[in-house]
Image: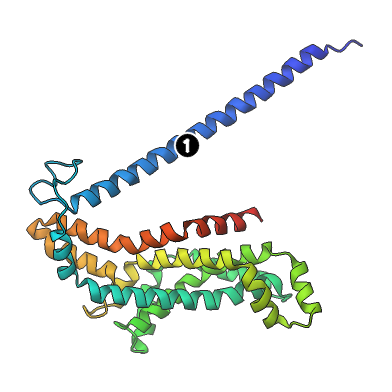
Amino acid sequence: MNIDYDFLKSKARERQYMRVNKFSFRKLIIHAILIIWCTSIGMLLYFMITSSFKTNKTVFKQLWALPEKLSIVNFAKAWSNLNFGRYTFNSVFVVIISVILIIVISAPASYALTRMKMRFAQPMTFFYLAGMGIPIQLLFIPLFKIMASLNLVNTLPGLIIVYTALSIPFTVFLLTGFFISIPSELEDAAFIDGCNEFQAFFKVMVPMATPGIVTAAIFNFIGLWNEYMLALVFITGNENKTLSLGLYSLYSSLQYTSDWVSIFAGSVLVIIPTAIIFIILSEKLISGITMGAIK
């Protein structure tokens, strides 16, 4: 039986060429979508930032033009109307305390579910994950009744408790991937050296899972800083408003006067903290996501 090796080689090269072309086409489509998305976001940011320095007469006449001069009048007006100092303190206090509590609760829980040999570890993990699938809107009424019975409505501690409780499922889900990826030999070596479970967790696991903990903290900080619906439900007075509620109040007070440039200036003031944190910690965020994704 004669085998035409040249024919087989040509077919193999043809199939390889088709696979390469198919992969290249898919990659081209993905890159095109990402470029369009990034360009759209960049244009919106450019419009918001440049409009915050313009006047109400020129903001829509010169839609994409650069401002003629850099003036902070709009920012000063937004600062005074937004009560930026008080609302910033409220947001910083609530978000930082919430993030600390979320990490302090979620990190040991993730370690226990992934590293300790417990009988109901897997069902408990699924129980945590089920919390991610519950729409927040369904929890408004029962949570409000519970917080009202505890006299925690319209208080910053009450908002911290709500933020912490609702952020734990996602954080546990995120941190379990990091604790699973840590080699068990390190934990065994700690036990051989005489460490108990708590010492192994704090001295070995926490330092090894630092990228994951930082990633979870960044995600929670950005999400809670921009959170609006829960703050709207549980904060009813002006004194305890967060920046997201203050920005909506600024929009409500200025929309009838068509002072759009002050609204843009207020929006810029609100996004500055998250932008700074993301720029500073973006490398740690990407490395942490990559570490959890490899496993």
Quarter of the figure that contains the N terminus:
top right
Residue 171: image location, x then y, percent: 53, 68
User: On the picture, is 172 further left or further right than 5?
Assistant: left
* Residue name at image x 18 percent, y 59 percent: 263
The answer to whether residue 145 shows anywhere in this view is no
Q: Name above or below for residue 73 compared with residue 239.
A: above
User: On the picture, is 280 further left or further right than 144?
Assistant: right
Q: Name above or below for residue 207 compared with residue 34.
A: below
* Residue name at image x 24 percent, y 47 percent: 47
Residue 169: image location, x then y, percent: 52, 69
Q: Residues within 10 Å of mark 1 (few under 14, many from 20)?
A: few
Say which of 214 and 112 sits in front: 214
Say which of 278 and 99 sits in front: 278
Q: Give the image quarter of residue 267.
A: bottom left
Describe the colour scheme in one phrase: rainbow
Q: Give the image quarter of residue 280.
A: bottom left
Residue tagged 1: 31
Quarter of the figure that contains the C terminus:
bottom right
Residue at the bottom extreme, as displayed = 150
The answer to whether residue 136 shows anywhere in this view is yes
Q: Secondary structure at mark 1?
A: helix
Q: Name above or below for residue 249 compared with residue 260.
A: below
